[in-house]
Amino acid sequence: MIRSLLVIGTGLIGTSVALAARRRGVEVFLADRDVAAARIAEALGAGRAEPPGGPVDLALVAVPPAQVATVLRDTQTRRSALSYTDVAGVKGALESDVLRLAPDPVAYAGGHPMAGRERSGPLAASADLFHGRTWVLTPHDRTGDAALDRVTALAGICGATPVRLDGRTHDIVVALTSHVPHLMASLTAARLREGPAATEALAGQGVRDVTRIAAGDPTLWTDIVRANAPAIAAVLRDVRDDLTRLLAATEALADRDAPGHTAPGHAETGHTAPGHTAPDRAGTDQDAARDAVTELLRRGVTGAARTRPPTGPAGGRTRIRVVLDRRPGRLGELLDAVAARGGDVTRADADLTPDGLLTVDLEIGTHPGSGSGSFPGTPTSTTPAV
């Protein structure tokens, strides 16, 4: 049980944890080397910007990864808490530094809430930031039960689901799911700087979705990349290989000597100009290039499916199949009914039955506490025509 909490670092994550803890009645103390940031968090209702009168139940170190070990050492030296944790997005090297520097490593259990925003600072904080998200726990070999129990309790207070991983596995996974995606977003966004004048007018939701996280703090993300460089480099090497194949395929597709494009002066003789590809070979290259692009896109579809939470009650999602009659507007009525019950359609497929009725398969995410009533059917059910 956590009755008191010290949050060191009142940025987005630290202040969001403090707000969630205060909402659950936890006494929270705030500390930050930027006095203004701590005062802003205090003004938001995240706690009191003052030192605790004695050891709190748990101290949360919410500073950049490169600073965690030294801040933890200093905090333990002052005996500020009974147990300690952090929120750093990199764990392997950090754990080694903690074991080397911390006076009481038994009292420390690493943590990483898998939540964030493209904005930073206490004014971007929200008590609901972690609701329904994963909170990774990375206890080391010497972590005591009391420390692990308190960090697990904190995840629950914030509405998150705790998941245990060792530090090395954590770093490999977040390189793939967080760090490299951020770099890919930045690479795409950087290209927009050089775009023609019409770039802003033609920028739609797709490019905004892809580049949203590129607005994150460059200094913080440089620190993250430095701390997890080996795992990030491994993923980037695979991306480089994919990009090399994709570039070769698109260059082949852009070849002016593809079928339908004949070198000037040779349309009637059927001869091939020196340095030009014969039509049959060009056609083979074009087919191979199209296959390469299609294969990459199909792999992307398969990989994207792994970003969706599992279906069913535990994942907050369900699947239903509905057969609609021929009356116009019935699908619209179905989607309105889903929305009225707090649902969000995350995937939809439709097909016609042999007798001409429309069969719709929906994957629906539910939002706790919203809407009223329940969805028709069960996670693999077929609901009659509506």
Image (cartoon, rainbow, N blue to C red):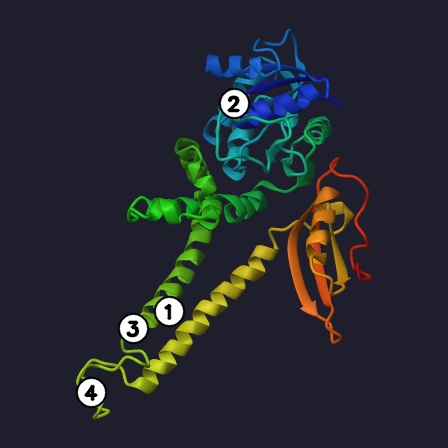
Look at label 4 and name its amino acid: His
Q: Secondary structure at mark 1?
A: helix
Task: Give the labeled residue for mark 2.
Answer: 123
Q: Which of disc 3 and disc 2 is earlier in sequence?
A: 2
Q: Is any atom of residue 61 visible in this view? A: no
Label 4 to label 3: alpha-carbon separation: 17 Å
Mark 2 vs mark 3, CA separation in Å: 52 Å
* Residue labelled with disc 3: 255
- Residue where numbered disc 1 is placed: 249
Mark 2 → mark 1, Cα distance in angstroms = 46 Å
Residue shown at 70% from the left, 38% from the top:
161
Dot placed on the residue nearer the N-terminal end, 3 or 1: 1
For the residue pair 156 and 196, the one nearer the viewer reads as: 196
Q: Residue at x 38, y 45 (%)?
A: 189
Residue named by callout 4: 266
Task: Bin the neighbour count of mark 3 within 10 Å (Cα to Cα): few under 14, some 14-19, many 20 and up.
Answer: some
Which element type, helix, strand or loop, lies under badge 4? loop
Residue 345 visible to the viewer: yes
Type of the residue with mark 3: Asp
